[in-house]
Image (spheres, grey):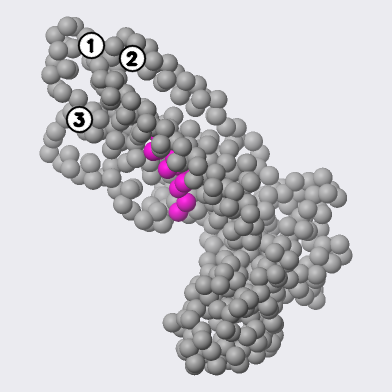
Amino acid sequence: MPLVRRRLSGLLASVIACLAMTLPVHAQTPLPTVAAASDLKFAIEEVAARFERETGNKLRLVFGSSGNFKTQILQGAPFHLFMSADENFVYELADAGKTVDRGRAYAVGRIGIMVPPGSPLKADGELKDLAAAIKDGRLQKFAIANPEHAPYGTRAKEALQHAKLWDAIQDKLVLGENISQTAQFATSGSAQGGVIALSLALAPAVARLGTFQLIPESWHQPLKQRMVLVRDAPDAARAFYAYIGTPGAQEIMVRYGFVMPKN
Amino acid sequence: MDWQALILSLELAAMTLAVLLPLGLLLARWLAYTSFAGKAWIEALVVLPLVLPPTVLGYYLLVSLGGASPIGRWAAEHLNIRLTFNFLGLLVASVIFNIPFLVLPVQRAFEAIPRQLGEAAAVIGLSAWQTFWRVELPLAWPGVLSAIVLTFVHTLGEFGVVLMIGGSIPGETRTIAIAIYDRLQAFDLASADRMALLLLLLSMGAVGASFFASARMTARR
């Protein structure tokens, strides 16, 4: 028994020592954190890398659905700059007194249909082949972002309504939590296609996963993307907010298919 | 490979154990050795985090710890700390969702110890604390060890609750499980593959090693 006990206390001591060593230092001042809509994934990563190189500031980027970010910021999430895919979420936060001001429009987004290789569906921006595929049973699953809280999902729904396909396609829809996950679904081969953001379709990592065609702009409300500084945002976040308006940053955004708003 | 996320997960798992192990040992021993009216309800409460969907647990934690809740407001006013969307919040959540993983195996281990041993220890003059330390804990050790490993590995893998109350902030709340999801969303399948494989090997290795050690300890008796 003494042997067992010595070994036991040795084990316990080493467990406790390990625990003590890992005591983290999480109290330091947080890095400026940008909560950005998923459609910005590739574009803003590039803009941020350039900003960090030029200014020496460091940023933390978090991507997700704009609606979720809005809820999280209302709950007190430590995000400093909110880049929404829809201006209304920014206005809601401003009305709740969470932001510095009512923010600035920074881009207009576009949607289109993405079809993976080998899909029986054609990437037809006017959605005529989609209509045919619903009728003849070629379409089993079709991905859009959740229209409840993802702006790209709301616009996809409007476009499908405009094409008079919304009711017929109901039981085929798979809903992505955000537009990035939707692109994942649309290109996985498990769905025959989906409606995704042009900015994602233009990214090399996504472009090679299928063919993409724009849906006419007039078929849905414009995706007016707006950003806003959250109250008490640190200087680096404010600097990045200003940086997004510079020609260098805009050149990157345009390359990813964003239209610059006329301010 | 997101090393920051891996380190964060290891830290979270270690800190969870540091908090939960002493509390869990006491709770498990108490549940094993006493019986009283309403004990079944306490035991049900212990098991609850195991059977509740993580989204439900995460939602309740978000609502009860968030800035608008009484607990959240009290912590912000008196301690100047926030309990959601940061590491501390994750730790609180992690301790709660790990209660069954720690308490259940330990409770079973204590229950398996013959009562006469405790009486014998009292007869030869050992105090309650000495009995716990010299008689009960060594006998319960295989159970305690597997509880420690289960808790540790489960913390590395927990996804739903962490996503709900964490917000995927790098270096703060983006654990390895969340990082895998994040890499998938970024179409960075190579990284996601590597991290998923690492998590698989780590979990398999830890659980396998603990079963092996438990079996040897039991065989030695």
Circle 2 or circle 1, nearest the eye: 2
Please name the residue shown 38% across and 44% down the image.
Answer: B97
Can see residue A184? yes
Which residue has dot 2 on it?
Answer: A4
Q: Verify whether residue B151 appears in magenta.
A: yes
Which residue has dot 1 on it?
Answer: B127
Q: Verify whether residue A2 appears in magenta.
A: no
Q: Chain of mark 3?
A: B
Q: Say few, some or many: other residues with alpha carbon within 10 Å of mark 3 (under 14 / 14 to 19 / 20 or more).
A: some
Q: Earlier in the sequence, mark 1 or mark 3?
A: 3
Can see residue A99? no
Please name the residue shown 14% across and 33% down the image.
Answer: B35
Q: Chain of mark 2?
A: A
Q: Is residue B181 above or below residue A119?
A: above
Could you tell me residue B208's position as x and y percent? Answer: 41, 36
* Element assignment for label 1: loop
Which residue has dot 3 on it?
Answer: B111
The range drawn in magenta is B149-160
Rounded to the nearest whole Å, what is the CA distance between mark 2 and mark 3?
A: 20 Å
Rounded to the nearest whole Å, what is the CA distance between mark 1 and mark 3?
A: 20 Å
- The answer to which of B130 and A245 lies nearer the viewer is B130
Please name the residue shown 55% across and 93% down the image.
Answer: A132
